[in-house]
Image (tube, rainbow, N blue to C red):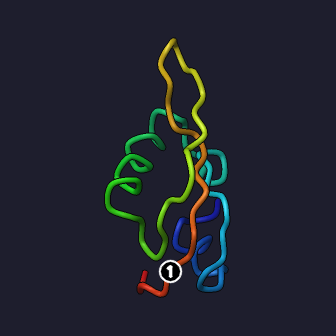
């Protein structure tokens, strides 16, 4: 299982990449609250860009994938 820090560290500053629930081996209902925080505050070493991809689980739209851009901020 890839950790979030490992995924971010592999990217160069300014690179755009995707982080998904599946990559982190999380269910959408576990990933959604994390992604919501990233939308508001940015993530560890990245900022969310664009519109998050949502999936429907039990009639509820949950974030399952986000496109992010690597910053120079420390992890």
Residue pictured at 47% horizontal, 19% vertical: 60
Check the image and name the residue furthest to the top: 59
The answer to which of 11 and 26 lies nearer the viewer is: 11
The answer to which of 50 and 43 lies nearer the viewer is: 50
The secondary element bearing badge 1 is classed as loop
Residue pictured at 46% horizontal, 76% vertical: 45
Tell me if mark 1 has few (under 14), some (14-19) or many (20+) residues whose alpha carbon lies within 10 angstroms of its own: many
Q: Which residue is mark 1?
A: 71
Q: Quadrant of residue 51?
A: top right
Quadrant of the frame with the N terminus: bottom right
The answer to which of 39 and 33 lies nearer the viewer is: 39
Quadrant of the frame with the C terminus: bottom left
Check the image and name the residue furthest to the front: 50
Q: Is 48 displayed left or right of 65 in the figure?
A: left
Q: Is residue 21 above or below residue 9?
A: above
Q: Is 45 displayed left or right of 24 in the figure?
A: left
Q: Position of residue 15 (x, y in %)?
A: 66, 76
């Amino acid at each position: 299982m890839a950790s979030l820090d490992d995924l971010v560290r592999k990217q160069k500053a300014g690179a755009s990449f995707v982080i998904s629930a599946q990559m982190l081996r999380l269910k959408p209902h576990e990933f959604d609250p994390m992604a919501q925080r990233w939308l508001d505050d940015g993530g560890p070493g990245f900022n969310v860009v664009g519109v998050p991809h949502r999936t429907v689980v039990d009639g509820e739209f949950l974030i399952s994938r986000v496109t992010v851009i690597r910053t120079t901020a420390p992890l």
